Amino acid sequence: MSREDQRRAVRELREGLIAQLEELYMQAFDRVAGQDLGEGGIARLTQLLLRSREAAITPLQEEIEAPLITRAPDPAP
């Protein structure tokens, strides 16, 4: 597998993981919303879920969005 193929495979894997995490968090939010916990309990759980989601997904997104540097620029003539 070429280096470019490896990069593409890793990117696709990260994107797939992000999609799975998004689905998991959506299901968790739906479960919390469906409980009779009162506004305060739902708000606290929702805030915790949002923080957890951010911590789980952001590093994967940042790595995808990071600029790819393959070699140093050629010196000016």
Image (spheres, rainbow, N blue to C red):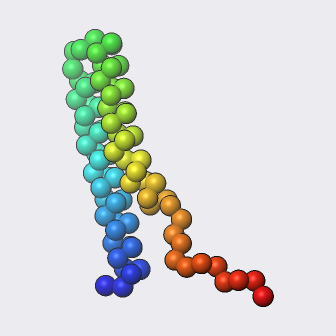
Residue found at the very far right of the displayed protein: 77
> Which is nearer the eye, 73 or 50?
73
Say above or below: 25 vs 7.
above
Q: Is residue 68 left or right of residue 19?
A: right
Q: Residue at x 22, y 29 (%)?
A: 31
Say above or below: 27 vs 4.
above
Q: Residue at x 37, y 33 (%)?
A: 51
- Residue 37: where, in percent of width, then height? 24, 14
- Residue 23: where, in percent of width, then height? 28, 45
Q: Residue at x 66, y 83 (%)?
A: 74
The tally of labels here is 0
Residue found at the very far bottom of the displayed protein: 77
> Which is nearer the eye, 35 or 8?
8
Q: Quadrant of residue 48?
A: top left
Q: Quadrant of the C terminus?
A: bottom right
Q: Is residue 51 left or right of residue 65?
A: left
Q: Residue at x 22, y 15 (%)?
A: 36
Q: Quadrant of residue 34?
A: top left
Q: Is residue 33 left or right of residue 76?
A: left
Q: Quadrant of residue 75?
A: bottom right
- Residue 6: where, in percent of width, then height? 35, 76
Q: Quadrant of the N terminus?
A: bottom left
- Residue 47: where, in percent of width, then height? 36, 26
